[in-house]
Image: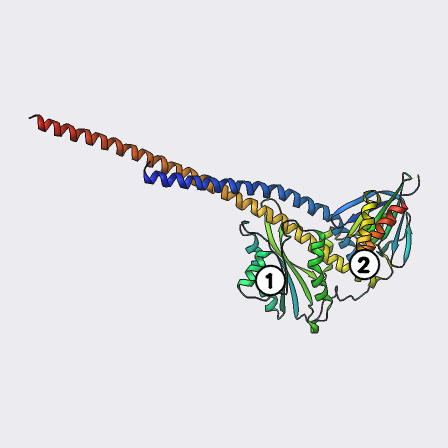
């Protein structure tokens, strides 16, 4: 059995996903980072972007994460985000509409959120 | 029906209507406590992880961040007071306000100026009536606060803390809210949020005594701390808002329960009085009839002669 790490993906108001994984890829402010079991303790600032979790069953979980932190210690990885959604929970049409509306209102934050959601859906 | 009896009947009717209302409010509050508690529980993992991360950075690095180091000579402090929007919750809001007053007195005794920030209409009304200065206030979401509300409340607080004291910033940040201990007990507490005291933070996240690993910071310890602390404040404010909401509902449930009980007692004693009045009325009627009959008998007896 391949080595595993325990992943907790938590948003401010709920726990989004938790389980065992073999690889987690997230985007920090200084670039994409891949964390595998046995990585050295790490604490980083996340950019808005999709997070890819390769589960130990061979599946892939993709989540849209809007800002937050990644912390890894003792083979436990926590992804903290104010807002986090699994790609399965995202409605692409709604995100598309939100993107257009954000562009029309030139709301940069909303535009970025919608883009991240769409990217997460595309990766899935 | 006699006048007295009518008055009693009318009062019984009005108390019964009140009892129905308070009973309904009690049940609504009871169902909301559960919802609020669930929200507190849902927000706990984030708060715990965040506190752990903050503790890890603050202890694991030699950074002197303004938010973790105490100033030698603090001169200004901000106090965030969380009260409710609506009344009918017993002493809930006034207890929180009293705790805030005590804290403000203590801070002033230490020679600090106090800036007050208020959440909830009751606190705003209290300070407004006494014409005290309020730095900023928010109303309308104390029933079920969302994370966005917490962000809105935290923004000016974080700004005040990061501003230099000479330019109107503050050195310390305190928060006064009602802690949800259990269904029956809610206690107002005053906590210092910033500068961070690491022992307390560790005790809260349940990681006291745990040796934290040496973290590799991405991009750097300062940057991580810079990004973490606002989130930490937000999460603490969010947790306080949620606990306050749960406490508010619990306090309201208790207040409405005793109101319902009192209304029941009142109805009991009023219906006793009404019964007594009815009996008295009947007795009077009988004695009037008997008296009238005997008077009539006496009169006819007299005319017979």
Residue at the limit of the structure toward the bottom, as seen here:
B166
The front one of A2 and A86 is A86
Q: Are marks 2 and 1 in contact (CB under 8 Å)?
A: no
- Respond whether the residues carrying marks 2 and 1 are from the same subunit: no
Which picture quadrant has residue B5?
top left
Which picture quadrant has residue A43?
bottom right
- Is there any visible trace of residue A77 in the rendered image? no
Percent across and percent down for residue A93 are 82, 45
Q: Which residue is mark 2?
A: A108
Helix, strand or loop at label 1? It is helix
- Asked whether, in this view, residue B235 is left or right of residue B103, the answer is right
Helix, strand or loop at label 2? It is helix
- Circle 2 crowding by C-alpha within 10 Å: few under 14, some 14–19, many from 20: few
> The C terminus of chain B is located in which quarter?
top left
Residue at the limit of the structure toward the front, as seen here:
A104
Mark carried by residue B283: none
The front one of B66 and B163 is B163
Q: How many marks?
A: 2
- Asked whether, in this view, residue B97 is left or right of residue B66, the answer is left
Percent across and percent down for residue B36 are 66, 46
Instruction: Report, in whole angstroms, how far the alpha carbon at label 2 lies from the one at label 1.
Output: 41 Å
Residue at the limit of the structure toward the right, as seen here:
A2
Relative height, residue A39 to residue B295 (above, below) = below
Which picture quadrant has residue B219?
bottom right
> The N terminus of chain B is located in which quarter?
top left
Q: Which residue is mark 1?
A: B103
**Chain under label 1?**
B
User: Which circle, 2 or 1, is nearer the viewer?
Assistant: 2
Relative height, residue B74 to residue A55 (above, below) = below
Percent across and percent down for residue B97 are 57, 58
The front one of B162 and B191 is B162
Percent across and percent down for residue B243 are 65, 50
């Amino acid at each position: 059995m391949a080595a595993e790490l325990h992943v907790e993906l938590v948003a401010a108001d709920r726990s989004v996903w938790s389980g065992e994984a073999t690889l987690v890829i997230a985007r920090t402010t200084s670039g994409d980072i891949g964390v595998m079991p046995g990585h050295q303790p790490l604490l980083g600032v996340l950019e808005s972007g999709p997070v890819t979790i390769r589960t130990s069953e061979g599946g892939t979980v993709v989540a849209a994460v809007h800002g937050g932190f990644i912390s890894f210690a003792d083979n436990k990885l926590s992804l903290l985000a104010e807002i986090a959604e699994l790609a399965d929970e995202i409605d692409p049409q709604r995100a598309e509409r939100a993107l257009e509306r954000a562009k029309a209102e030139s709301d940069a934050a909303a535009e970025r959120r919608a883009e991240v959601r769409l990217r997460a859906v595309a990766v899935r | 029906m006699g006048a007295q009896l009518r008055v009693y009947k009318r009062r019984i009717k009005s108390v019964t209507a009140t009892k129905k209302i308070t009973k309904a409010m009690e049940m609504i509050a009871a169902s909301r406590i559960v919802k609020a508690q669930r929200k507190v529980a849902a927000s706990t993992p984030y708060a715990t992880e965040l506190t752990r991360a903050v503790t890890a950075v603050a202890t694991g690095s030699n950074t002197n961040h303004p938010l973790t180091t105490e100033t030698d000579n603090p001169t200004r402090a901000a106090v965030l007071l969380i009260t409710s929007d609506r009344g009918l919750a017993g002493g809930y809001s006034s207890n929180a306000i009293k705790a805030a007053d005590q804290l403000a007195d203590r801070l002033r005794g230490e020679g600090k100026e106090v800036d007050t920030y208020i959440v909830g209409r009751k606190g705003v009304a209290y300070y407004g009536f006494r014409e005290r200065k309020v730095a900023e206030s928010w109303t309308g979401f104390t029933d079920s606060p969302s994370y966005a509300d917490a962000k809105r409340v935290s923004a000016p607080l974080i700004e005040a803390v990061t501003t230099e004291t000479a330019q109107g910033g503050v050195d310390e940040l305190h928060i006064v809210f009602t802690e949800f201990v259990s269904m029956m007990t809610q206690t107002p507490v005053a906590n210092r949020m910033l500068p961070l005291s690491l022992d307390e933070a560790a005790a809260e996240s349940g990681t006291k005594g745990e040796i934290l690993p040496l973290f590799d910071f991405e991009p750097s310890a300062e940057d991580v701390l810079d990004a973490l602390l606002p989130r930490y404040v937000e999460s603490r404010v969010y947790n306080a808002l949620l606990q306050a909401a749960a406490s508010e509902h619990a306090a309201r449930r208790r207040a409405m329960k005793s109101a319902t009980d009192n209304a029941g007692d009142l109805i009991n004693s009023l219906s006793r009085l009404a019964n007594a009045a009815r009996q008295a009325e009947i007795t009077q009627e009988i004695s009037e009839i008997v008296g009238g009959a005997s008077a009539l008998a006496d009169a006819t007896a007299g005319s017979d002669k």
